[in-house]
Image (cartoon, grey):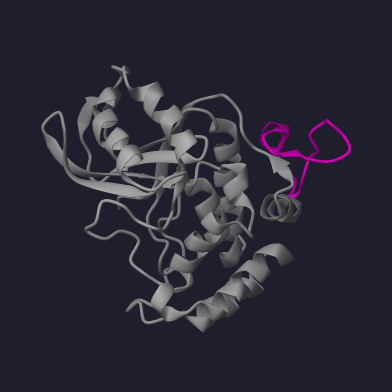
Amino acid sequence: MQFSSTLSLALAVVGATAAPKNLDYAGSIHALSYGNVEMQGNAGGEVWFKVTGFAADKLPHIQDDVGLYTMDNLESLKTVASLGQVAAKEGKWGDVVYLYNVFSMNAHADYAKASSTQMRDGLLVAVTKADKSGIDSDLIDLYVKTSSSPFLAEAFNALRTTPAMSITPRWTREACDNAHQAVKSACRTLIENIRFNASVKTGGPRSICQSGCCISWSANATFQLENLYNAANYCVNACGTATVSCEVFGVSLQGTLVDQCLSNRADGCT
């Protein structure tokens, strides 16, 4: 499938030529998973990755739509969401899992590589048994067979040797977490951009992202973006050194109590 010029321009191939290259579906997945694209832009807006209604038996851990408000990467996220729709219609379940994770991390180019630590964490969640006892080999087999890139298939195969003891819930009752960590410098930029932002946010999507960092919250609320600042700033100061993954419980967003997360994902508080 060949994408329209508008979509293909959002994925500029890194190579000998400076001009963006139009990619077909398989070429897009291959370039994304290898890390051979430039995706960061400067446009902001709301965008969704729709998965509701897609095969629950093939995607047992991916059944909720993901929405985010990006401050810097709207067109690339639209491209990734469109690729996800094609993948689901063609039964490319490995690609769906991968694209879901690319989208959830604000289509941040460094995280989109199939070999990145951040992507490994996301794929791991998708192939973990429901009882958290270990890896579901059948799901890995399915995702390997339905991956359009050898780099992605290799990333799924690498999860077979992940010790069960290293598979933990995404969030614990602790404020800081070792999974889904964002680079603090990116989070500081995001936090400063919302610090005095009086724009009103209501309903979904329940996240706001910039570069490789996202703030997300667990329930619909009506509030000003600057109300997210205190908990996010606490996380940056309380957790880790160069990276951060953090959840703060009982944050009041103008009267609505939520759990607020700071991580590399838009679905950190679901």
Taking the spot 30% from the left edge, 58% from the top edge, the residue there is: 171
Q: In the image, 3: left or right of 224?
A: right
In the rendered view, would you say 230 is above or below 93? above
Where residue 210 appears, x then y in whole percent?
48, 33
Taking the spot 47% from the left edge, 72% from the top edge, the residue there is: 127
Q: In the image, 129: left or right of 260?
A: right
Where residue 99 appears, x then y in whole percent?
56, 53
Taking the spot 42% from the left edge, 31% from the top edge, the residue there is: 188
The answer to whether residue 15 is magenta is: yes
Taking the spot 67% from the left edge, 55% from the top edge, the residue there is: 33
Q: In the image, 222: left or right of 109?
A: left
Q: Nearer the viewer, residue 193 or 74?
A: 193
The answer to whether residue 105 is magenta is: no
Q: Which of 27 and 264 is in front in this view?
A: 264
Q: Which of 169 and 53 is in front in this view?
A: 169
The span picked out in magenta is 1-24
Farthest left residue in view: 255
Farthest front residue in view: 241
